[in-house]
Image (cartoon, grey):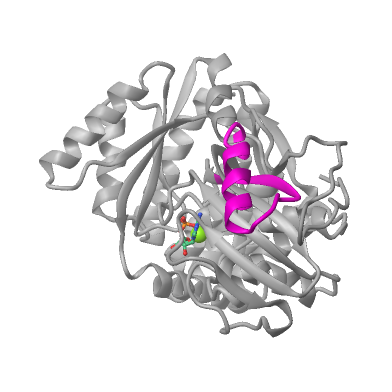
Amino acid sequence: MNRSAQWEDDSRADGVADVFARLFAGPADGVWAAPGRVNLIGEHTDYNDGFALPIALPRNTLLAARARTDGRLRLHSAQGEGGITELSVAALAPGAVTGWAAYPAGVVWALAEAGHTVGGADLHFDSTVPTGAGLSSSAALECVVAVAYDALYGLGLPGPELARIAQRAENAFAGVPCGIMDQMASICCTAEAALHLDARTPQDHRQVPLDLRGQGLGLLVIDTRVSHDLADGAYAALRAGCERAAALLGLPALRDVDAGELPKVLRALPAELVPLVRHVVTENARVTEAVSRLREGDAAALGPILTEGHASLRDDYRVSCPETDLAVSAALDAGALGARMTGGGFGGSVIALVEAGREDAVGGSVTAAFGAAGHRPPRLFPVTPAAGARRLAPERGTRRSAGSGGSEVRGLSR
Ligand code: ADP
Ligand code: MG
């Protein structure tokens, strides 16, 4: 694990608590962290009840939080616009909150909607997850609220249930029809492992050990810094296409297509649905293959699987764009073992699997290719699989009373 990067965020807990104390006149009950993610393989599969293999990034959204007894919800972010947003928990409803505050407020709403007794809170966020880069800053923002509320209100909910609540917030409250992968990754990932997710039964997720350094490998995240406007509408249309294909095939979801029967299945479908189904079915198979290779201790074998996955997203699912295609081809030309776009598509980030020590050379080549094509330089982050959501302060097992307006820390379930 890249411990220094992990600890960099963990060591920010005190600073975030200090800002909280100034903003909200008194100490926080605790500080929590939830990471962004990259998905190694298994893209656009979660909403088809399929498989994915994300890792958590050593970049986190930190939250200093204090429960309130008056039903008010006050939110502030070091990265958000304006000052403090103040809301009433009882008045939360889809459509009632716009802007960034919809993500955290949506989690409080979703907890209440699911029947949990939750009240207000003062919340201050500070994040090192780049926003809008396909690295799931939105899930990090939601998930850190979910784990903090779980502790502040003594809910004791399992990780996959908190992930489901966070996804519900993003779908119904923030209006983004995402699957459950991002939230599962942010909450359930562990350091030095990839999370083998079955979106049909998230509670049955498995940790697959992934010691990149030990295997002489590195993983480079390349944020292309482009985001194309068609992302939202196209995502919903692709999702609808997959649902229509499953209905035509008489299956609950595309995950239920038997890969051995794929040619026959494709012949039964209208032409426009063929590439969608081919991507989803082959992508699920790539996840299974990747997990087998990792279990055999051969992480380098992921390389060609990533590159095949990119071709499928580019040619069949058609969610890549010139910038992501260029980042992938430049990384491969520079000797990457494999590369693919990650996240929903139409921009965002690319991952490249490289031999350890080659991160700078590969990143430099991609930057040069972007310059030659007239694109802004990409942002580069070498990453290793990091820990999922967790409490940073106070240390597990300690309790302290909060000052004015605060309450005692309840529940130390996480
Ligand atoms: P991604 O999840 O890939 O980063 P999204 O468009 O799904 O991209 O989410 C980005 C949005 O999430 C931002 O525009 C902002 O509204 C919100 N967001 C994420 N992190 C923060 C933060 N730390 N502070 C305020 N808003 C944030
Ligand atoms: Mg997002």
Q: Is residue 110 magenta?
A: no
Q: Is residue 122 at least partly visible in the picture?
A: yes
Residue 218, compared with residue 245, is above or below; it is: above
State which region is magenta.
10-36
Residue 51 against residue 297 in the figure, above or below: below
Q: Is residue 13 above or below residue 346?
A: above
At 50% from the left edge and 67% from the top edge, which residue is drawn?
A: 100
Q: Residue at x 60, y 74 (%)?
A: 86
Which residue is found at the position 28% from the left and 47% from the top?
325
| Residue 20 shown in magenta | yes
| Location of the N terminus (image quadrant) | top right
Residue 313, position in %: x, y?
40, 54
Q: Is residue 90 left or right of residue 400?
A: left
Could you say where residue 348 lies in the image, as x and y percent from the top left?
A: 37, 52
Image quadrant in which you'd find residue 95: bottom right
Give the camera-side residue of 11 and 249: 11
Q: Position of residue 359 (x, y in %)?
A: 36, 24
Total tally of numbered discs in the picture: 0
Instruction: Determine whether 395 is above or below 68 in the image.
Output: above
Q: Is residue 53 visible?
A: no
